[in-house]
Amino acid sequence: MVSSRIAWANRSTGSPARDAAVAAQYLTSDNAASYAASYEGWRPAARYYCSRLYAVDEALDAGPHGRLLDVGCGPGMLVRHLLDTRPEEFQITGCDQSPAMIDAAIARSKGSGNVELTVARVEKMPFPDKHFDVVVAMGVLEYADASDGLREIARVVRPGGLVVVTMLNPLSPYRLVEWFVYWPLLRVLGRAERLLGAQRHAADVSGIRAIPLTRLRRMMRESGLTPQDTVHYDVTPLVPPLDRLARRWSRKWREHPERTVSRRARPWPGTAYLVTARRRTDGA
């Protein structure tokens, strides 16, 4: 049964401006369709999502089967992938703060009998304590109150259960150039073009708050989780806009996504990272 609809999530990140910036990106069906389309093709976003999905798949290989929660499921890209590749392993629940995203996820998982989808924020989820064997938080904590979100994740996963969390890497050269050079330049260029009546460039405020690895692992421990493995993904020495030019002719990453991940001691080229953790057993 595929189900939907609580109301738009009522828990705030604490910043009205940030809430508005986040909501504006995922409010409509067009937003959901655009996000899903970004998984295709050869642009940097497609490479990022391909690499992330490979890293998540690897993490799930080491975990239990059973009840799986996809937090911040978006238009159901991971849900669909799991239904296609692991149809017998999981009973899937997905939640997202955007009704438009949940509608898209319902459409994408149509015909599947072991999926439940509902509107909810990661900071306040309507699920029982210790309910899930696996919780995946893929690309959601950047847009939320991460501390509250991790506490909720720890609450709903069973003791010993697997938690998979991804996070943009704010210390990678790619992100530093993108956020502090490339996007600001695009905004300046867009304002100049707007004055001339022919705007072609823009970079919207995203509401993203990326967390360094050491701090996220500490936050996970404080939430009752025991961090285990760390994988850096979307590994690249390039920075914007050079990455856009190079990836037009270098397309081996889709055939060999394993080349886009790293467990090296100095994995700074990864534009993002993944941490697996286990919920501590009661009394531990």
Image: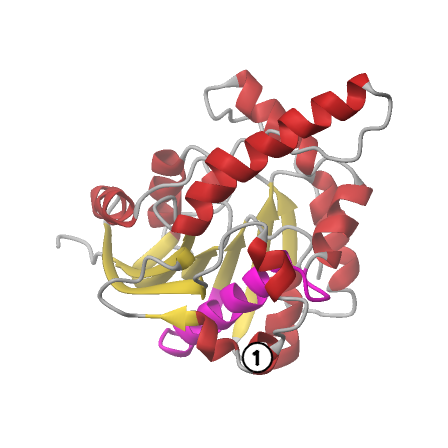
Residue 51 in the image, given as x and y percentages of width and height: 52, 67
Q: Residue at x 40, y 59 (%)?
A: 270
The answer to whether residue 134 is left or right of residue 221 is: right
Relative to 59, does residue 5 appear above or below in the rendering? above
Relative to 100, does residue 117 appear above or below in the rendering? below
Q: Residue at x 64, y 28 (%)?
A: 187
Residue 31 in the image, given as x and y percentages of width and height: 75, 43
The answer to whether residue 200 is left or right of residue 166 is: right
Q: Quadrant of the C terminus?
A: bottom left
Residue 239 in the image, given as x and y percentages of width and height: 50, 53
Part of the protein shown in magenta: 39-67
Front one among 200 and 9: 200
Element under disc 1? loop
User: Which residue position holds label 1?
Assistant: 86
* Residue 46: in magenta span: yes
* Residue 5: in magenta span: no
Relative to 220, does residue 276 appear above or below in the rendering? below
Amino acid type at circle 1 is Arg
Q: Quadrant of the N terminus?
A: bottom right
